[in-house]
Image (tube, rainbow, N blue to C red):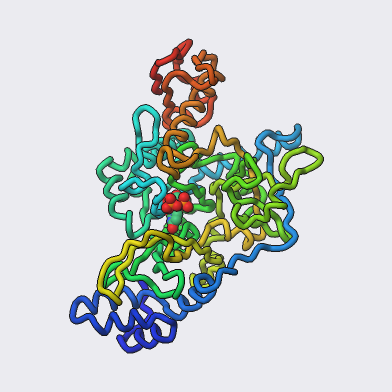
């Protein structure tokens, strides 16, 4: 970790210059090893830069700049629109498959988030996501990777970004599970950077204890600098990786390595590509893919002007801004290299999130648990790299096939484990039905039994053709493949 100040005095001057006098005072009040502990943490931050961030994003709210004259972003439809596009998709699949089998594609998973909505006491990747075996998310993705490595007789290195908070528990879990049978040489774990939380009213960095700051991960956009600073990008270069398949830890339905998507991206010379879903409603909580002056933007649902979000395309009768972002991307390695050449000039904006953050108050020397929002956390989002690309591609996918993120605790939101497990059951049933199996459904047309199809076995419905399948799955049956 870099050090920005070499002496106590230099640090204190920077703190005082940038509205953080309370930290300078706290340093002065501590003695011996406790002072050294706080000093060692504070010098890892550039307080001039943090001072500017506080002015822009904490003490004023007008930081999000929505580009003007937004237009809907074009995308490749899930089903090719005619024979020409069919041929294009076939060529793209072949190109993607070739890149995978030549070992030019890596999997990159962001798993540094705090998972506060889920309220699970371990890193989210340990969450028991699968319907029958209750296999963890990490275990589930490992099976998918096994499948693709076997299918393409190749090695697909897996890079996992953690945060300081969950790094050891994540690595420990892989060790305990013998890396789920993957070769640890092809797995790399690294942590993203953390940022202090700032008081909502005053912009002062909050302390967690007398000797440490209250820190949180700097957002999934922090992955772009973390991937370089950790040496992961250099490792990719050494291995001859050209494209990075980017996924989040929380969506068990995702196809971690999708040859069609990778191929469309590669053939278009795209620097960063994205998958999209048609939104269910104008203000669904997904980012909106929009074009402005030939650049692709993701406008968060909360920043999207309602009138625009509600516009209907007279031709199709569907929403004009239909494309919602689901955080599945492919990035070129050389694009990430260019973007992060000077990590201080990354060019991604910050987003402010107002949160309740527990802190230690130096004024009264006690820990405080606020009842409401008291702090601003600053995060970068990876999709803000899209407007920095010269070329981008968007591919439509299906919600039922590829999107059921685990965000909320059961009973506390739509994106719950129950919903994700149900989506896995329903997808498994559809694949079985497509292979001639009769699946019993209840009055609401929901699958009446329990079904789990491991990604080790199948990634696509046609993969099931290689297996002996039952003629039917009855109500109450449990079917695990
Ligand atoms: P979310 O935005 O859903 O946040 O992350 P979260 O931290 O998982 O959950 P909440 O909001 O606290 O409930 C989407 C993806 O981005 C990763 C997460 O691990 C998840 O895969 N992420 C998020 C990071 O890797 N780092 C971050 O700083 C934030």
Q: How many dots with numbers?
A: 0
Q: Residue at x 34, y 80 (%)?
A: 22
Q: Residue at x 45, y 69 (%)?
A: 200
Q: Pick out the residue farthest to the right.
A: 315
> Eyeballing the image, is 470 above or below 458?
above
Q: Position of residue 136 (x, y in %)?
A: 35, 38
Q: Is residue 307 left or right of residue 104?
A: right
Q: Position of residue 450 (x, y in %)?
A: 41, 22
Q: Position of residue 349 (x, y in %)?
A: 55, 66
Q: Is residue 271 left or right of residue 203?
A: right
Question: Which image quadrant: the N terminus?
Answer: bottom left
Q: Residue at x 81, y 39 (%)?
A: 315
Q: Pick out the residue farthest to the top.
A: 471
Q: Position of residue 152 (x, y in %)?
A: 48, 36
Q: For this rendering, which residue is in front, 359 or 14?
A: 359
Q: Residue at x 72, y 63 (%)?
A: 68
> Eyeballing the image, is 238 above or below 470?
below
Q: For this rendering, which residue is in front, 413 or 295?
A: 413
> Eyeballing the image, is 223 above or below 431?
below
* Residue 302 seen in this snapshot: yes
Q: Is residue 71 left or right of residue 276?
A: right
Question: Which image quadrant: the C terminus?
Answer: top left
Residue 21 position by quadrant: bottom left
* Residue 231 seen in this snapshot: no
Q: For this rendering, which residue is in front, 360 or 249?
A: 360
């Amino acid at each position: 970790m870099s050090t920005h100040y070499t002496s106590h005095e230099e640090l204190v001057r920077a703190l005082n210059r940038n509205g953080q006098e309370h930290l300078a005072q706290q340093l002065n009040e501590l003695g011996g090893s406790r002072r050294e502990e706080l000093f060692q943490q504070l010098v890892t931050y550039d307080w001039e830069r943090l001072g500017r961030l506080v002015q822009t994003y904490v003490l004023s709210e007008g930081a999000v700049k929505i580009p003007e004259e937004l237009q809907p972003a074009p995308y490749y439809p899930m089903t090719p629109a005619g024979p020409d596009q069919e041929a294009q998709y076939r060529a793209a699949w072949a190109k993607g498959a070739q890149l995978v089998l030549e070992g030019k594609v890596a999997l990159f998973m962001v798993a540094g988030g705090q998972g506060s909505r889920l309220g699970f006491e371990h890193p989210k990747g340990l969450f028991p996501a699968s319907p029958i075996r209750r296999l963890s998310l990490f275990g589930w993705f490992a099976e998918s990777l096994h499948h693709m490595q076997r299918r393409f007789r190749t090695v697909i290195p897996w890079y996992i970004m953690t945060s300081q908070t969950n790094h050891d528990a994540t690595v420990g879990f892989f060790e305990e599970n013998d890396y789920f049978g993957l070769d640890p040489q092809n797995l790399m774990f690294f942590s993203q950077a953390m940022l202090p939380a700032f008081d909502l009213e005053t912009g002062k960095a909050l302390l967690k204890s007398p000797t440490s700051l209250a820190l949180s991960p700097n957002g999934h956009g922090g992955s772009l600098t973390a991937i370089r600073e950790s040496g992961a990008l250099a490792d990719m270069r050494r291995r001859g990786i050209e494209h990075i398949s980017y996924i989040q830890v929380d969506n068990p339905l995702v196809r971690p390595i999708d040859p069609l998507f990778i191929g469309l991206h590669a053939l278009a010379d795209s620097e960063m590509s994205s998958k999209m879903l048609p939104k269910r409603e104008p203000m669904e909580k997904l980012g909106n893919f929009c074009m402005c002056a030939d650049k692709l933007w993701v406008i968060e649902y909360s920043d999207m002007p309602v009138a625009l979000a509600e516009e209907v395309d007279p031709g199709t009768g569907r929403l004009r801004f239909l494309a919602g972002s689901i955080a599945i991307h492919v990035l070129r390695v050389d694009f990430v290299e260019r973007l992060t050449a000077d990590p201080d000039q990354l060019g991604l904006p910050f987003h402010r999130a107002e949160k309740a953050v527990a802190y230690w108050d130096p004024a009264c020397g006690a820990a405080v648990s606020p009842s409401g929002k008291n702090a601003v956390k600053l995060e970068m989002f990876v999709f803000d790299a899209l407007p920095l690309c010269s070329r981008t591609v968007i591919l439509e996918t299906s919600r039922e096939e590829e999107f059921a993120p685990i965000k909320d605790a059961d009973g506390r939101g739509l994106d719950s484990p129950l919903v994700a497990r149900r989506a896995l059951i329903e997808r498994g049933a559809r694949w079985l039905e497509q292979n001639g199996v009769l699946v019993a459904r209840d009055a609401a047309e929901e699958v009446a039994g329990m079904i789990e199809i491991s990604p080790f076995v199948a990634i696509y419905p046609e993969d099931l053709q290689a297996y002996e399948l039952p003629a039917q799955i009855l109500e109450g049956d449990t079917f695990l493949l």
